[in-house]
Amino acid sequence: MSFQQIRYQPEVVRFLQRGLQTKQIAHAYCFYGPADTGKRKVALELAKALNCERSRVDPCDQCPTCRQIQHGNHPDIVTLQPDGAFIKIDQVRALQERFQYSAAADVTRVVIMEQAEKMRVEAANSLLKFLEEPLSPMVAVLITEKVQAILPTIISRCQKIRFKEVSHKVRMEILEKEGMPDYLAIIFSQIHLDNINFLSYSLQELEDLCLRMMQWCKQILEDGSIALLTIQEDWFKQAINQELVPLILEILLLWLRELLHYQLTQQSTLFIKWFEECRDQASKWERKRLLRAIEIVLQVRGELSKFVQPQAVLERMVLEIQSHREVRGRRAKFTKIN
Ligand SMILES: [Zn+2]
């Protein structure tokens, strides 16, 4: 990976390369914009460009320094992530301690701060002070999807760079380049969730999530009480991280739409690896109920916020989809008797 390969954010790359060429690099940048738009990747390329042994405009990707940065083991390039809910002052102190001596000549230290909106005030103040009096040249890159949530005192000292939304096709290419197989990339490139970076989960975790969701959907269709039990026992007691509930709903929605699409065209376009499962489930859903289920999931998705218990929301969703079936079931029975 070099700047040349980041084709999806041409303006950002041009802007940074101009800065590198003219040696006008800010002390702090704030890369902001939607998830999966390449912010972290560009930050790493910038770190490489500032330190590459061959080119200080477009990193070579081959020299030992570029490789160390790429693999996350360069001593002067540090990434901070929230420790729990926040980026805490202790993390900034640890950074200060790590950088308490000057770096080797010709090294520009880079601190990449992910989810920078989660920085607490005291951590932010400490970091800014540190940035203003560095022992060696240092650049901070704050990364965020919620730029409005970053403290004004911080944002005013950063050069803001906006990362634009990327099309599905390009998003898919990005995920594939990161090593996601096409059958997962085609699904996850459809999902836009601000606070979830798919690339932070292993491929196995993402595939498991799709499989669980398909299994769950089958349970909703066949036996609501088991679907409810899955929510209670399987998801909320152990396996599933609650932060993933919005993602589960997005996958469920895509799956239900895929079933509808299959009913209409006999083709599977997103869940290509699970074509047979799609065909099987599509044949079992009655069309009206499927449409109603999609409607219910859309409604529930809108209601899902931190003020509502996600477990209760999912349970109600299953019951609503179920009640639709029971009404139909009773009608069917009545017709048959007559
Ligand atoms: Zn290099």
Image (spheres, rainbow, N blue to C red):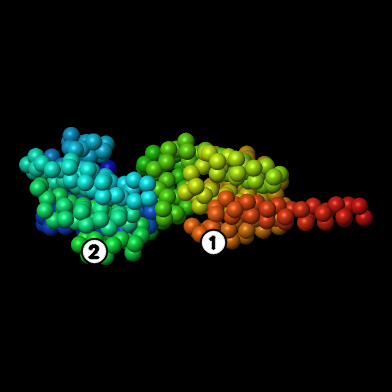
Instruction: Judge depth for marks 2 and 1 and give the one in front.
Output: 2
Left or right placement of residue 169 versus residue 335 in this view: left
Left or right placement of residue 211 versus residue 178 in this view: right
Q: Quadrant of the C terminus?
A: bottom right
Q: Residue at x 18, y 41 (%)?
A: 98
The outermost residue toward the left is 105
Q: Amino acid at mark 1?
A: Gly
Q: Amino acid at mark 2?
A: Thr
Specify few, some or many for label 1: CA neighbours under 10 Å numbering under 14, 14-19, or 20 or more. few
Specify few, some or many for label 2: CA neighbours under 10 Å numbering under 14, 14-19, or 20 or more. few
In the image shown, does 161 or 279 lie closer to the viewer? 161
Can you say whether 330 is above or below 226 in the image? below
Q: Residue at x 27, y 36 (%)?
A: 71
In the image shown, does 234 or 30 lie closer to the viewer? 234
Q: Find numbered disc 1 in the image and state the secondary structure of the residue it sits on.
A: helix
Residue 10 in picture, x, y percent from top left: 28, 56
Q: Residue at x 11, y 53 (%)?
A: 133
Label 2 vs label 1: CA separation?
33 Å
